[in-house]
Image (cartoon, rainbow, N blue to C red):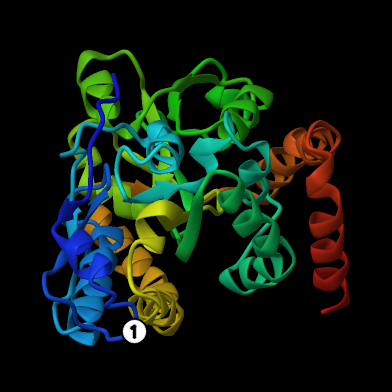
Amino acid sequence: MITRRHFTGSAAAAFAAGLGGPLTARAAVNLDVSTILPDGSFHTENAKLYAAEVSKATQAAVRINVHAGGGLGFKGPDHLRAVRDGLVPMADILVSQQVGDEPLYGAESLPFLVNTPEELHVLHKHLRPDLEAAALRHNQRVLYMVPWPTQYFHLKVKSDTVAGLKGVKIRVSDKNSQDMVAALGMSPVLIPWGETIPALASGAISGVVTSSVSGVDGRLWEFVKYVYPTNHTWTCQMVNINLDAMRKLPQAQQDVLVSTARRMEPMFWARTRNVDVESLKRLKEQGMEVVAIPPAMAAELRQRTAPLIEAFVKRVPASRKPIEAYMAEVRRS
């Protein structure tokens, strides 16, 4: 159950005194950030780096406190609503998990729509304005977005055919992944990350759809042996702030939040590339085997899941224009 939480601080007195322009105020304002990701996650580290830069730029007048590992009691799918309703002023939100409240947020995680970080940049050129407009409809602003690395299947079984994966129970994080693995004949289990390791330990699932980074975070080598580089989808975390909380800050401090995010986002994207390489190396060092996917298997993965893109566009009409613009630009390049 979501419980009401508030951002802390005594900035209200300073605002009442009319301190709307300077970066500093008579008392600091503290903004809590909720994330389900652990302290070791590079997304959590990004949030802490951002917090440090904001504190520096405002001379500690704005202090952003990152609560990792679900420490504030919110699950991943709760976050868009939690920020919207002011239950927490900021959150690090997995975009694709919010489709129950905003269907458009499933667009970037469609299977095999995006193949490289460069293509993800192209997609965001066309899609991101709509993603940010959707956030505004939910009483919040996107400060920055950072992709996860490419996604993998982490499984107990080894196969060089799609048929060999039939019936495997595998954890997924969002509806697109759920539809994708179902189309492959597997059995998707839609659960938050916090429930994934207990499900593996109990035998309720036999695999996980996730990045190499989360594979390391969850020490998946203790439960599964094989990593399949399917590269089937990309998705982002977005750090959002409640608009009411933001508007209580002097304009100069609001500007710092936005400009700092804009400046640091390219660096965060670069880190995504590095952590994938490092994490996949760590999985192999711990005894996991990277399965080479034969061309015939790769082709069947794409063929079986191809109808899901058009089905999504029909279900979410607002996605058609940006997705078609993206596809046209990628074909030209």
Where is 223 relative to 90, above or below? above
Q: Which residue is mark 1?
A: 21
Whether residue 291 is visible, yes or no, is no
The residue that appears at 35% across and 68% down in the rendered structure is 277
For this rendering, which residue is in front, 13 or 138?
13
Residue 263 location (% of width, % of height): 42, 85
Q: Quadrant of the N terminus?
A: top left
Left or right, 226 with reference to 70:
right
Residue 248 location (% of width, % of height): 34, 61
Whether residue 195 is visible, yes or no, is yes
Where is 42 relative to 19, above or below? above
Residue 43 location (% of width, % of height): 31, 60
Is disc 1 surrounded by few (<14), some (14 to 19) or many (20+) residues within 10 Å? few
Q: Quadrant of the C terminus?
A: bottom right
Instruction: Give the tally of numbered discs.
Output: 1
Q: Secondary structure at mark 1?
A: loop
The residue that appears at 41% across and 37% down in the rendered structure is 85
Where is 213 relative to 206, above or below? below
Q: Quadrant of residue 49?
A: bottom left
Residue 131 location (% of width, % of height): 63, 55
For this rendering, which residue is in front, 126 or 23?
23
The residue that appears at 76% across and 35% down in the rendered structure is 308
For this rendering, which residue is in front, 109 or 94?
94
Residue type, numbered disc 1:
Gly
Left or right, 162 with reference to 274:
right
